[in-house]
Amino acid sequence: MFPLFICPDLKLYLQAKLVSPNECEDFESSLLSYEKLDRASPDLWPEQLPGVSEFAASFKNPITNSPPKWMAELETEDIEMLKELGSLTTANLMEKVKGLQNLAYQLGLEESREMTRGKFLNILERPKK
């Protein structure tokens, strides 16, 4: 049998087929593609997602002193919270997320109790026409 270091990627294939080293080289060369793809044509390479090109181009512009549009609507409290969350470690951030999930669950339970209470007190009943 021939040495297997000639085609290490095809080791199992060679052992199963017992091919010669020349056949292995022919097989590897048959996998090569010499096709040249020209990406200049928009007909051949249409934009996959509409608007992505403009979005990507907006980040190529030099950085300006004005804040981004989404950040202009934030208040100082919001910015402070973003800074605080950004400074947390991964473990602390996960703990914060778990705390928020628990709070949301507790609020859901409380809302459910209040809705049930309102139902029993006939507060939620529609007025009769």
Image: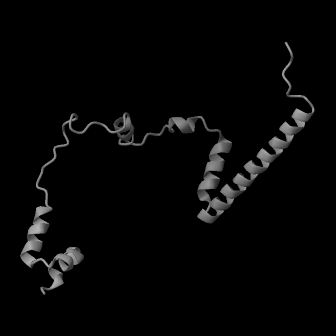
Q: Looking at the image, which residue sits at the far top?
A: 129
Q: Residue at x 66, y 42 (%)?
A: 76
Q: Nearer the viewer, residue 43 or 4?
A: 4
Image coordinates of residue 117 in percent, x first then y, are 89, 38
Vertical side of 2 occupied by 43: above or below = above
Image coordinates of residue 80 in percent, x first then y, are 65, 48
- Res. 77 image quadrant: top right
Vertical side of 7 occupied by 50: above or below = above
| Horizontal relation, residue 1 to residue 113: left or right | left
| Horizontal relation, residue 106 to residue 68: left or right | right
Vertical side of 15 occupied by 61: above or below = above
Q: Residue at x 61, y 52 (%)?
A: 83
Q: Nearer the viewer, residue 63 or 46?
A: 46
Vertical side of 84 occupied by 92: above or below = below
Q: Residue at x 69, y 57 (%)?
A: 98
Q: Looking at the image, which residue sits at the far right?
A: 121
Q: Nearer the viewer, residue 62 or 12?
A: 12
- Res. 87 image quadrant: bottom right
- Res. 86 image quadrant: bottom right
Image coordinates of residue 41 in percent, x first then y, are 19, 36
Q: Nearer the viewer, residue 63 or 44?
A: 44
